[in-house]
Amino acid sequence: MLSYILRRLAVLPVILLAVSLVIFAILRLAPGDPALSYLRLSQIPPTTENLAIARENLGLDKPLSDQYATWLAKAARLDFGRSYVTGRPVMDEILYYLPATLELAGASLLITLGLSVPMGVAAALRRDTALDHLTRAVAFAGVSIPNFWFGFLLVWLFSVELGWLPPLGRGGLSHLVMPAISLALMSLAVNTRLIRASMLETMHHRFILYARARGVSEGTVVWRHMFVNALIPILTATGMHVGELLGGAVVVESVFSWPGVGRYAVSSIYNRDFPVLQCFMLVMTVIFVVCNLAVDIAYAVADPRMRLGGQGGRA
Amino acid sequence: MTIFFRALTLVLLLAVPAAQALAGGNELAFSWQSNCGPLNPHLYSPNQMYAQNMLYEPLVRYDAGGKIVPWLAERWDISPDGRTYTFHLRQGVTFSDGTPFDAAAVKANFEAVRKNLPRHKWLELVNQLDGLEAPDPATFVMKLKGPYYPALQELSLIRPLRFASPAVFPDDGDTSKGIKKAVGTGPWLLAETKLGEYDLFVRNDKYWGKKPALERVRVKVITDPNARLTAYETGDVDLIYGSGGHASGQIGMDAFKLLAADKANVTGISGPLGTRALCLNSGRGPTRDLAVRQAVAHAVDKAALVKGVFLDVEKPADTLFASDIPYCDLKLPPFAFDRAKAEKLLDDAGWKLPKGATVRQKDGKELEIDFCFIGNDALQKFIAELMQGELAKVGMRIRLVGEESDAFGKRQHDGEFGIIFNDTSGPPYEPHAVVGSMRSPSHADYQAQVGLPMKADIDAKITQVLTTTDEAQRAALYKDILTTLHEQAVYLPLTNMTNIVVHRQDVTDPGFMPTKYEIPFQGMTKR
């Protein structure tokens, strides 16, 4: 198990190297000129003279390969340069805004798992009843509604009309409720459907019939035999949800003025703040890769077949 | 399953009291798209101009109609050769840290700006600075290399020639490396900054002038205009003030109209604060032809544009500068919307419409013009598409070139355009700074004018108008320059840009300021 984890971790630098190259190439090949961005954002007039100075200061006069090597060497020491807009070190800014995003994404993940499991299980057990139809309708709507629009609907109802919840900012639990629900909506809908399908598939296995024949209580059948076996696809999905939630935070944070790294990234994209974009994408890659690793480890824990080399099933 | 819904209900119920906790005291909540920055008076981004203006004050202030009025300088004398300005400073003014505001402090601030000359080169006054003297604590003498009449206008700018306490300067006096703390003479102090959340300003109780009625101004960071609108509707924001409707605007124009229709709100639209204009390239493509440029000006229905796109929040502009800008009330005859006249101009110039064709031709070349705009700027895109339709009616083919802002900026810089957006800067930069920059090849203005036969003459007159000490000659030169540019139709002014204000009845505001980034917090009250 330990060697498995170490092996996976060893691949991480290789992935990051490849991703960094892609990020660098995409940003540099995009139309536009970082020197011009720098001047515009620093509010320096873009005269030919100023452009030349900016190019030299930013190292843009060197060949792309040199620029990449310099950037990589600095990035390895966690020095991603300074934001063109604020002039502060990029890494400091991202680390400053990241906790708020993790708080939001974490709360959304809790909502996703906390609601999708009971909803999915209940829908599977009461298949084709009103409850099942309702769950499916909710899931359908959840997948179809864009999270920013749902966010505005929540604000309209709970902040404008009822005055129960604050429409913006970070603070106590009251501030977290609406952004977390808006962000969770999509993952919640997908997960509910997935759990329902996975449960339905598992409940027709023979070991379920045998368990019932042995006189095992219904609760044990559902949770210990059906649910645990239905868990594998859900784990995969959860790994993907983390990425989805972090990606969704980019939009939801703007709607709720949540002071997170997503909104910071949106401003940077809008401003073409190159150093910030490079660092942001790399940090997101690390989080994504680490989450997938965690999911793979969870697999091994949940399913002995993975640990033991794929012999026999659980019954 | 019900337990989960119970839990959710509980969470919501717990959340309610916290949401209802209100900000106490006499605090006004405003919002801006970013934090205010470290508030160094001598630097630019990320320092926000509205906030620099709250803390730091100028020697003289720009008042309505371009009148220069005393501020930290009570009066001043200008030598007959226009090169020596002697300022008599207001007595009894202190910085908010208790340091006296005197000639030595003024000199230290000017010197700090001069140390960072390349950064301020865009501002001609800084280039012109020669000697700085503080003969006594109440007198500051500024000597220029040559006469430069807009010196006072440029002293009134929000940056860089305003004053921080010398006590907060770094040891070597070079403020471009940062200052220890934001300390000015202004009516407000920066009490707290929470990145991504808010900036809190408190009243400067030691302020020399009329103290603000409000105790605090909390400026929340809201990037999304729709989020700003909901924040206003829920009472989380008391005031919306600033430009409306475009990328850096406070709220969309439709949202403004919606709020204006509700009697619970007090709304207002300012006078002209700059001109939304297009540059027509006299050095490239069919717009080299004066008749084509004039035909474009006659073919655009600005009244429809203002009604359809700007919802009457901005008014149509007929000249490059509004008539209330100094030296600009010239009564120039507007290019009225007249499609027949546009067609006649083109016919007479040899741009004929072949039988069955929709695009005019001259010497076998089609009348096709590149119209360049920022692709993700919804307003520019809308205007460009609208004009494409309008100009097609007189036989011009407009090729829309929507690009991201850097590529757009590069086109302005290099002159790679037929028609391009190029707004003026608004007071106090008008007309002198805008006209001055027409001589610089990195500006779209220069590029648009480069094909004019009298370009060298225009540039010479611009240099003359900025340096003459004779008021009558200055007015005559401005009239000459602006009339030529108007007749040559290198600019197509569209609308006068404005600021908007929205607040509820419990807030009062003293009306708009004469420039774009001054927000009159010190004249506001909240019940």
Image (cartoon, coloured by chain):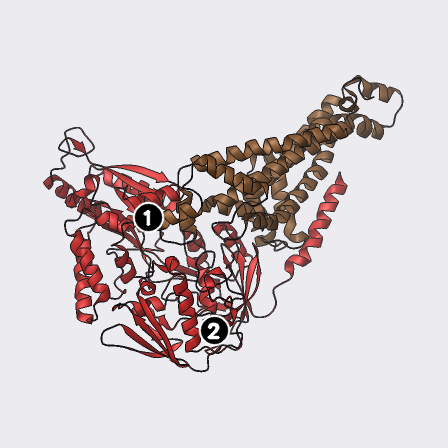
For label 1, the SS is: helix
Badge 1 and badge 2 both on one subunit: no
The residue located at (33%, 66%) in the rendering is B154
Q: Is residue B138 visible?
A: yes
Q: What is the crowding at mark 1: few (fewer than 14 residues within 10 Å), some, or many (at least 20)? A: few
Q: Which mark is residue B129?
A: none
Q: Give the residue type that dot 2 points to.
A: Thr
The residue located at (43%, 76%) in the rendering is B104
Q: Position of residue B37 (x, y in %)?
A: 50, 59
Which quarter of the rendering shows the N terminus of chain A? top right
Relative placement, left or right, of B460 versus A48 is left
Relative placement, left or right, of A304 versus B172 is right
The residue located at (20%, 67%) in the rendering is B474
For disc 2, the chain is: B
**Mark 2, residue position:** B185
Query: Chain B: what color?
Result: red
Chain letter, colour brown: A
Q: Give the residue type that dot 1 points to.
A: Thr
Where, by quadrant of the figure, is residue A289 drawn? top right
Above-or-below relation of A182 to B165 = above
For label 2, the SS is: loop
Q: Position of residue A232 (x, y in %)?
A: 72, 27
For disc 1, the chain is: A
Q: A228 and B48: which one is in front? A: B48
Q: What is the crowding at mark 2: few (fewer than 14 residues within 10 Å), some, or many (at least 20)? A: many
Q: Position of residue B64 (x, y in %)?
A: 33, 69
- Asked if marks 1 and 2 touch (Cβ < 8 Å), the reply is no
**Mark 1, residue position:** A48
The residue located at (46%, 45%) in the rendering is A270
